[in-house]
Amino acid sequence: MQALLIVNPVAGHGISRERALKLKNALNTDDFKTDLMFTSKAENAAELVVKNGSERDMVICCGGDGTLSETVGGIMRLKRRPKLAYLPNGTTNDFAKSIGLRSTLNVAATDIINGNSMKLDTGLLNNRSFIYVASFGLMSKCSYNTPQKLKRRFGRLAYIFRGLGDFITTKPQHVKVTDENGEVYEDDYLFGCVSNSKSIGGIIHLDDTQVGFGDGKHEVILIKYPRSPLALKRIISAARKRDYNNKYIQLFHTSSVTFESDKPMRWSLDGEPSENEKFFKAVTKPAAIDFVLQTPLNKVS
């Protein structure tokens, strides 16, 4: 087995480098050889995969959700796609928690070597890859606006601090949303997303009946802009109760969906900003990634 270990050395309070070296040592056996490469700039993970991944049996990503997203983007550009393993080491690790990954080094090394895997859907938003969520509005702003120093010091609280400030300044976005069957949702929205995850921003939580990681569809969640304190209270209450089909929050499943707005919109793809556009199309790429699991197969839907 030939593997490529890609590491973001600044992720997770800057401890990825040390953890990566320990993981590499744990993985290197007579039958499993691992080459280690560190990222040095944005999009570098994708570049490293494209340049070095096609002849490997597996690519292992060590970092946060953003590094994972870049790694997936690189794998999707390869004709021969290696398996993907992930050692979560970021600030929030939403996707890792969603799919049940564990970050303990010895456990991760054993499961990576065993190589049990499942096919996961990925997404394309205007032809740019994402692994677990593409979003616009409130929570998408705080993901890429939160300073790295604040993330390292406060972790998930940093997003909450930033999110409170963003809420005050966030204006409604009037968006026309059309699913694969032509059904239209049009309103002023506070937040919207296309996801393949049980946890989004630590605020929205879905369960096994609502998310299938390899079912060929993404979940779309739309939250209407609250025009009054009472409306905001009801949105918060609905989110806490996981009630995503009501007057303020809508959830549906689709393999493709379009978003149209009169004004340019900024999206976040796995925490990284997109270009400002008036039209976005999200498409599900079914069973596109062979993802190495760190939990028993029967524990993941």
Image: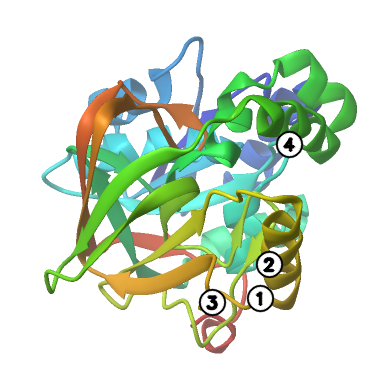
Where is 207 relative to 268, above or below? below
Task: Give residue 13's position: percent from left, percent from top.
Answer: 80, 25
Q: Which mark is residue 108?
A: none
Task: Give residue 212's position: percent from left, percent from top.
Answer: 42, 78
* Amino acid type of the residue tagged 1 in the rendering: Arg
Q: Earlier in the sequence, mark 3 or mark 4?
A: 4
Which quadrant would residue 219 be assigned to in this image? bottom left
Q: Which residue is mark 2?
A: 239
CA separation in Å, label 3 and label 4: 32 Å
Camera-nearest residue between 209 and 25 = 209
Task: Give residue 113's position: percent from left, percent from top.
Answer: 54, 60
Mark 4 nearby-residue class (10 Å; few <14, some 14–19, many ≥20): many
Mark 1 nearby-residue class (10 Å; few <14, some 14–19, many ≥20): some
| Left or right, residue 52 beside residue 151 | left
Mark 3 nearby-residue class (10 Å; few <14, some 14–19, many ≥20): few
Q: Which residue is mark 4?
A: 91
CA separation in Å, label 2 and label 4: 23 Å
Residue appearing at x 73%, y 36% in the figure = 91
Q: Earlier in the sequence, mark 2 or mark 3?
A: 2
User: From the viewer's perspective, is the residue at label 2 or at label 4 nearer?
Assistant: 2
CA separation in Å, label 2 and label 3: 11 Å
Q: Which residue is mark 3?
A: 246
User: In this view of the protein, can residue 284 be seen by the observer?
Assistant: no
CA separation in Å, label 2 and label 1: 5 Å
Task: Give residue 149's position: percent from left, percent from top.
Answer: 79, 14
* Amino acid type of the residue tagged 3 in the rendering: Asn
| Disc 2 and disc 1 in contact, CB within 8 angstroms | yes
Q: Which residue is mark 1?
A: 242
| Left or right, residue 164 beside residue 23 | right
Residue appearing at x 57%, y 24% in the figure = 144
